[in-house]
Image (spheres, helix red, strand yellow):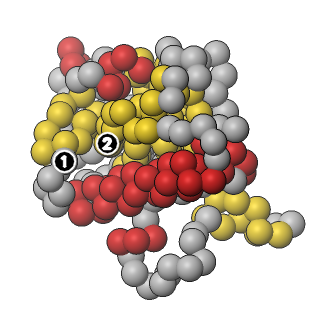
Amino acid sequence: MKLQNLVNPELWLEVENNAVTLSESQIEDDTLRAVTLRELPNNVFVFSADKPVKISTNKWEKSRNQFLNSENQKINKNCDAVIIHYDGNQLNIACCELKSKNPKPIQYETQLINTKLLVDYLVALFNTFYEEKVEIKNVWYVLFYMNRAIRVHKSNRGEPQPVKEKMKNYPLYIIKYKCNKAMYNNIKWTDLISP
C-alpha cells in the first residue's frame, strides 16, 4: 500500500521518462501554461489537487471537499501539483503552483499551505489505517510565474532561475521561478529543490 492509493486516480498526473508537465487551464497567449519538471528521481508520484474531475458526460469540475464551507476561500484553495518522492518510508514533498499575471502572495501562498495541509491529512490517514508508516522529511513550496510587464534582457532569457525568499503571509520559505515563456519551461528536479 502506498500513500497515492488514498488519492482519487482522476487527480493523478502522468510521469513519463522521469518527467511530468504541470499545466494551467488558462489558454491566453500571454499566460503561463506549462512547466516541465525533468530528471525526476524514481519512486515519484504526482497529483493535482486543482485538476477538474468528470462529474457527468459533459461536465467537469474541480474537486472540492464537500465537508468544508465552499464560501470560505482560504480553505478551498489548492495548488496545481504535488510531487511526492518516496525515499524509503520518508517523503520529500514539493507543492507547486503556476500563476500568470501579477500573482498576489496571499493567493498562491494560501494555495500552497492548504495543499501541504491536505498532504498532512493524507499522511495521518495512511499512518492510522495501514501497517506501513511514512513521515514527511522535506517540504518545498514552489511558485512558477510569468509577468509580461517586466521586460527580460535577451541574454537572460534561458530557463527559469529560482529565487528563495520568505513568504509574505506565512513564516515559511518559497522558491519562485520567473518564467519567460508561456510553454516549454524545463526545470530539473535537483534544481527545483535546491535553489
Q: Quadrant of the C terminus?
A: top left
Residue 136 percent coordinates (x, y):
40, 38
Residue 118 percent coordinates (x, y):
47, 57
Q: Secondary structure at mark 1?
A: loop
Q: Which mark is residue 172?
A: 1
Q: Which residue lies under the disc numbered 2?
A: 141
Tell me if residue 129 can be seen.
yes
**Looking at the picture, which amino acid does disc 2 mark?**
Tyr
Q: Residue at x 48, y 84 (%)?
A: 69
Give yes or no for contact between labels 1 and 2 (Cβ–Cβ under 8 Å).
yes
- Give the side of residue 147 with respect to residue 48, left or right: left
Quick one: 187 or 12, which is closer to the camera?
12
Q: CA distance from mark 1 to mark 2?
A: 9 Å
Quick one: 111 or 131, which is closer to the camera?
131
Q: Residue at x 25, y 36 (%)?
A: 175
Q: Residue at x 60, y 37 (%)?
A: 132
Query: For mark 2, does the 10 Å Cα neighbourhood hold few (<14), some (14 to 19), or many (20 or more) residues?
Result: many
Q: Residue at x 33, y 56 (%)?
A: 113
